[in-house]
Image (cartoon, grey):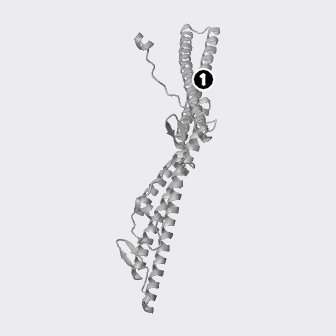
Amino acid sequence: MTKVLVDRIETQQDGLRFGDPIGCHYHWTEPGEVDTYGDSVRRLATKVELAVDAFERTAGLSEEVFAGEAADTLRERAGRRHEESATVRDNLRGLGRAINAYSEVLRRHREGLQELRAYAASNGLEVRDNRIWPPVETIAGDASEKELNAWERDWKTYRACFDLKIELRDARRASTRDLVRALADYADVHPDKDKTKLVAANAHQVKFGDLRREAAEEAMEAVQAGDAADAARRTVDGLKRREQGALDDLEKMVLAEKSPEEIQAQSAKVQALHRELVEARVEARDADKVADREQAQANRAARDLEAAEQGRPRLVAEQTDWQPVTNLRDRLG
């Protein structure tokens, strides 16, 4: 769940009404600092571009240059990494552009407030404590025409200042929303549309953002465990092929009546491969168990999220530590 905080002054400006003092003081982060940070993000995207090119070249290695099971695995992984790094690069570029654009909005906002203050002062309005104060609300009925014209002129100037301040505020807020969207796209986290609905979990309340984050984390762990299990199985398959090849070579050497030393060396190689294969099979079984466990947890988290979104109650079983009763009186009550 994403939360955007605003300061007290910003909140007060929501209630700005015609006739109130108009704040014209710039109190946000200096545009230069924001612009520098945006430049650093874009430089980071340029560095990621090097990784994108490297993964792309690795994924495109031809069979003539590098062949075999290891080569295929390397090309496959490099292809996945290329897509991931390209996404990170694009997100960083977009984020950097959004930050730079926001710095320009802050710069225009600061200059606009300065111009607003100068305009009000040059037209006779009172500017005090970084605020433009409105003229008096009423004027005497027997005032002269000159006084009436001056009073009307002051109120028209104040109206122009008020409208300009609203435009400056709305433009900055629109850019702030664009920046928040860019941040959300980069982090792949978006504000919940339904911020009020809660899901009961015994006596607790679980928010949708927590459930989504939990489901995403469990799904990622399940994918990683599945990849590890696949790699372990590929290792077993490769060792089985190597062991079979070594056995075939040993049989050929025996039929060809090679020297005892050569046959002994080949036999030792077969035994070493067999031991390695046994260990790999154990590791593969363990990896399969871990993958099954992680997948079960991911499925459970996904079901919890689905039940929450459909408004069904979420049941949570709390484990209690069971202690054997050794006192017969306690046991019988």
Task: Name the residue furthest front.
Answer: 333
Q: Is residue 123 above or below residue 312?
A: below
Residue in front for this viewpoint, 152 or 302? 152
Amino acid under label 1? Gly
Q: Is residue 167 above or below residue 41?
A: below
> Is residue 93 among what the camera can see?
no
Position in image of residue 159 (x %, y %): 48, 77
Position in image of residue 169 (x %, y %): 48, 66
Position in image of residue 210 (x %, y %): 51, 41
Circle 1: element type:
helix
Q: Residues within 10 Å of mark 1 (few under 14, many from 20)?
A: some
> Horizontal placement of 147 versus 216: left or right?
left
Residue that numbered label 1 is attached to? 238
Position in image of residue 9 (x %, y %): 41, 62
Q: Residue at x 45, y 74 (%)?
A: 19
Residue in front for this viewpoint, 300 or 104? 300
Name the quadrant containing residue 67: top right
